């Protein structure tokens, strides 16, 4: 099976919605600045697609929550992540409903309010992504205990990278370099004819 756990399904499904939400806000700002309806339309369809994707991501996340092994720290972050994810998704869904009700076209007085609300929601989705990354990359959420123990054992044993051409040359330079460069005779800037007895320069 391509994905073995609910956490892997969630990881696959939750990548696209945040990007669509953020791009929706970017397209709408650009559309407002340039007065181009094509950019505003791109913002609208990105928003609608993001809401649909967010629904799948939330469902998979709720399933993953009940199936992964985790401790108290991860549980607290997970609850915050869930609350923010649902709240931000609802906010974008309401913005999408507003756009649909207005048939994709907002009036001059509505658009500033919409852009402000969408920007706040976009900041929220960034925070949701931060919480998800914290769970996975700082606390190993979603990684089975057996797999984590195996990874820790391998990390403790260490590994060696194959030396590339640059590394080989660097090693060769170290091998041929004198141990103490201070022991080399100073460069006096002149030479002596053959047979000159050893002597020191003042």
Image (cartoon, rainbow, N blue to C red):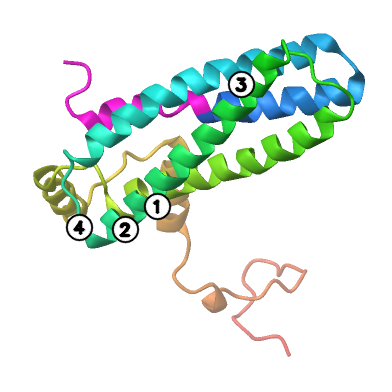
Residue 76: numbered disc: 2
* Mark whose residue sits in front, 3 or 1: 3
* Mark 4 Cα shell of 10 Å, populated few (<14), some (14-19), many (≥20): few
Q: How many labels were placed on the picture?
A: 4
Residue 8 falls inside the magenta stretch: yes
Pointers 2 and 3 in contact (C-beta within 8 Å): no
Q: Nearer the viewer, residue 17 or 184?
A: 17
* Mark 3 Cα shell of 10 Å, populated few (<14), some (14-19), many (≥20): some
Question: What whole-number distance in Å separates the C-alpha atoms at marks 4 and 2?
Answer: 9 Å
- Residue under label 3: 97
- 136 shown above or below 196: above
Residue 201 quadrant: bottom right
Residue 143 quadrant: top left
- 94 shown above or below 103: below
Residue 189 in the image: x percent, y percent? 77, 69
Q: In which quarter of the image is the C terminus?
A: bottom right
* Mark 1 Cα shell of 10 Å, populated few (<14), some (14-19), many (≥20): some
Q: In which quarter of the image is the N terminus?
A: top left
Q: Is mark 2 on a helix, strand or loop?
A: helix
Pointers 1 and 4 in contact (C-beta within 8 Å): no
- Residue under label 4: 71
Q: Which residue is drawn at 74% across and 22% down?
A: 27
- Residue under label 1: 80
Magenta residues? Answer: 1-17
Q: In this view, does 180 lie to the left or right of 74?
A: right
């Amino acid at each position: 099976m391509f994905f073995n756990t609910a956490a892997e399904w969630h990881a696959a499904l939750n990548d696209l919605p945040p990007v669509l939400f953020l791009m929706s806000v970017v397209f709408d700002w650009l559309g407002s600045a340039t007065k181009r309806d094509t950019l505003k339309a791109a913002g609208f369809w990105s928003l609608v697609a993001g809401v649909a994707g967010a629904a799948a991501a939330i469902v998979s996340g709720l399933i993953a929550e009940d199936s992964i092994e985790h401790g108290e720290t991860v549980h607290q972050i997970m609850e915050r992540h869930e609350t923010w994810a649902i709240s931000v998704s609802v906010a974008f869904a309401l913005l999408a409903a507003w756009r649909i009700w207005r048939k994709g076209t907002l009036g001059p007085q509505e658009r500033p309010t919409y852009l402000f609300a969408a920007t706040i929601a976009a900041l929220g989705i960034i925070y949701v992504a931060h919480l998800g990354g914290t769970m996975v990359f700082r606390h190993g959420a979603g990684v089975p205990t057996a797999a984590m123990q195996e990874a820790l054992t391998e990390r403790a044993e260490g590994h060696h990278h194959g030396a590339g051409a640059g590394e080989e040359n660097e090693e060769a330079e170290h091998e041929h370099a004198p141990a103490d460069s201070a022991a080399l005779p100073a460069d006096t800037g002149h030479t002596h004819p053959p047979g000159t007895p050893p002597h020191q320069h003042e």
